Amino acid sequence: MSAHTRRLPHADLLAALETRRSVPAAGLCEPGPSADEVRRLLAIAARVPDHAMLVPWRFILIEREARGEIGALLADAYRAGNPQMPPEKREKFAGIMSRLFPAPLAIVVVSRPNRETMIPVVEQEMSAGAVCLNLLHGAQALGFSGIWVTGWAATNDEAQRILGVGEGERVAGIVHIGTAKEPPAERPRPEVEALVTRWAKPG
């Protein structure tokens, strides 16, 4: 076989990429990935472009009883951080924080760019974003569903401390993974050709 022989398309992989659909965290239930599946999922997530092999990201896993424990801490932090908010509204959003991790597994992808190298920080942060997307594709391939979110818990200083995010780090995304309670409906997609220009030499 020639070294330049093109590999045949992988129909199952293409179908998974073409049909992946985010499912809201509240729509994800048990079963979630097993311990072996989580290890495999993280290995898939780590196979991303990474200029100079800096590994400018890491994972925080939230599962089992930790979901409720961290939710309670985030709810308290939200209350303490918003004393000026009307009580009813504050309690409403604190309640949302307490139920922030309904899926069997949440993976916090932490961006930790190395600022002492010549590699632009933006490249390192995009590598962390690619990790989030690989988690979604890996979950799809394993038969699960997921969603990539951020929000208050990903950006508030006290919330990040509770999550375990350190100085010089920030949350690239929180990826919730589980089994979809019902098949997700498709949503409108952009007309790709309308987004494309083909380069031509300037006149």
Image (tube, rainbow, N blue to C red):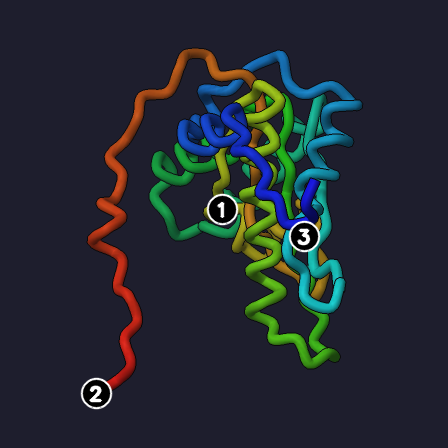
Please report contact status of discs 3 and 2: CB closer than 8 Å, yes or no.
no
Q: Are there few (<14), some (14-19), or many (20+) residues within 10 Å of tag 1?
A: few
Residue 99 visible in the displayed image: no
Q: Residue 60: where, in percent of width, then height? A: 71, 42
Tell me the SS state at disc 3. Answer: helix
Quadrant of residue 189 within the rendered picture: top left
Please report contact status of discs 1 and 3: CB closer than 8 Å, yes or no.
no
Is residue 58 shown left or right of residue 156?
Answer: right
Earlier residue among tags 3 and 2 = 3
State the separation of the CA atoms marked 1 and 2. 44 Å
Which residue is the extreme one toward the bottom? Answer: 203
Is residue 103 shown left or right of residue 96?
Answer: right
Tell me the SS state at disc 1. Answer: loop
Q: Which residue is mark 1?
A: 150
Quadrant of residue 76 within the rendered picture: top right
Q: Which residue is mark 3?
A: 161
Indicate the quadrant containing the N terminus: top left, top right, bottom left or bottom right: top right
Residue drawn at x 72%, y 71% as measured from the top left: 114
164 versus 168 height, above or below: above
Residue drawn at x 55%, y 37% as measured from the top left: 75
Residue drawn at x 75%, y 64% as measured from the top left: 54
The one of 135 and 181 positioned closer to us in this rendering: 135
Residue type, numbered disc 3? Arg
Residue 176 visible in the displayed image: yes
State the separation of the CA atoms marked 3 and 2. 54 Å
Q: Residue 182: where, in percent of width, then height? A: 41, 12
Earlier residue among tags 1 and 3 = 1
Residue drawn at x 50%, y 39% as measured from the top left: 148
Residue type, numbered disc 2? Gly
Q: Which residue is mark 2?
A: 203
Q: Residue 28: where, in percent of width, then height? A: 51, 20
